[in-house]
Image (spheres, grey):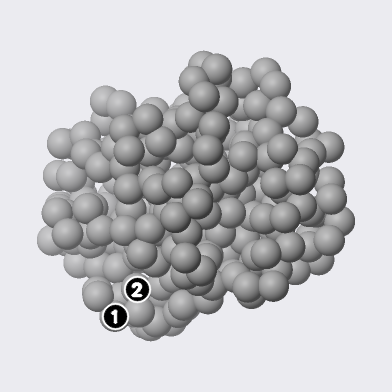
Amino acid sequence: MNPKLIFLDIDGTLTPPGTNVPPESAVEAIRKARSNGHKVFLCSGRNLPMLKPLLDRYQFDGAVGGTGSLVLVGDKILYDCPMEMADFETAMKLLGENHVYRTIESKVGAWCDEGIGEFLMKQNGGNSELIRLRKAVEDNLGMKPIKTYKGEPIYKIVYLCEKAEQLAPARKALEDRYHFIIQEESPKNCLNGEMFSRQYDKGKGIRIAAKAMGFDLSDTIGVGDSMNDIEMIETVGYSVCMGDGSPTLKAKSDYVCPPLEPDGLAAAFEKLGLV
């Protein structure tokens, strides 16, 4: 087998949503794959501070972060693309006027609207991104009040609202230049998703990383679970969706492995002959 370049989503794929501790079987599978000559990257919507605990503790060869807005090989940044400030300000105004809860993410941290915690407390279950956001807010994982934001470059906006109509003004103004991703399997009266520039996505980040690492796309593997993994799944040579992931993502993937817990990622690595 040719060496493979493997891209792993985090929440719901590598770790339980909102945590930084993978199952031990996943850690061991990654270790064995790397010892067999394969390279392993994180590929996540998380910003750099949220990636750092995993990058620092476990052995990864790089990361595609911020849904493709930031690409790292080792600790070297190859690609860095924040939102245009005028577009960010327009989005924040239109989303805020329509009572959409917002979190914003930069290279130095994340901020959230007042009241988002109360809204999240009313929601039970949901997709991995919603669970991650709930844990980030409830457990105070670096999430600061939006009133303390000082104008740092922003890479994406995560939004929460009750109805799609609340997003319509922002979409009308900006959808020609920005993705508006809606996650599947949300609770009733709760839509969650994210807005980020069409200049990048996880697939484009993967292309940058693969070129830098000297890999053909046919020798890349992507593993994910939610709607912000679509471009990853459509770009890699072989795609895997977690067993409890998005129905749409499952339909687009080459293989559906068991759920993350207890040993889904390890099972996928074994199925693909990586370990």
Question: Could one spot residue 264 in this view of the protein?
Answer: no
Q: Name the residue carrying label 1.
A: 76
Q: Amino acid at mark 1?
A: Lys
* Location of mark 2 (residue): 72
At mark 1, the secondary structure is: strand
198 up-or-down from 187: above or below:
below
Whole-percent x and y of residue 72? Answer: 34, 73
Q: How many marks?
A: 2
Q: Are marks 2 and 1 in contact (CB under 8 Å)?
A: yes
Give the side of residue 141 with respect to residue 189, left or right: left
In-front residue for pair 156/69? 156
Vertically, is 237 above or below 188?
Answer: below
Residue 220 horizontal/vertical position (percent): 42, 64
Give the left or right position of residue 154, taking residue 26 as reference. right
Q: Residue at x 67, y 64 (%)?
A: 89
How many residues crowd around disc 2 within 10 Å: few (fewer than 14), some, or many (20 or more)?
many
Image quadrant holding the N terminus, namely bottom left
- Position of residue 6 relative to residue 77, above or below, is above
Q: Is residue 85 visible?
A: yes
Q: Give how far across and how far down residue 242 sits, in percent.
A: 44, 35
Residue in the picture at 62% in, 21% down? 187
What amino acid is found at the position of numbered circle 2 in the picture? Answer: Leu
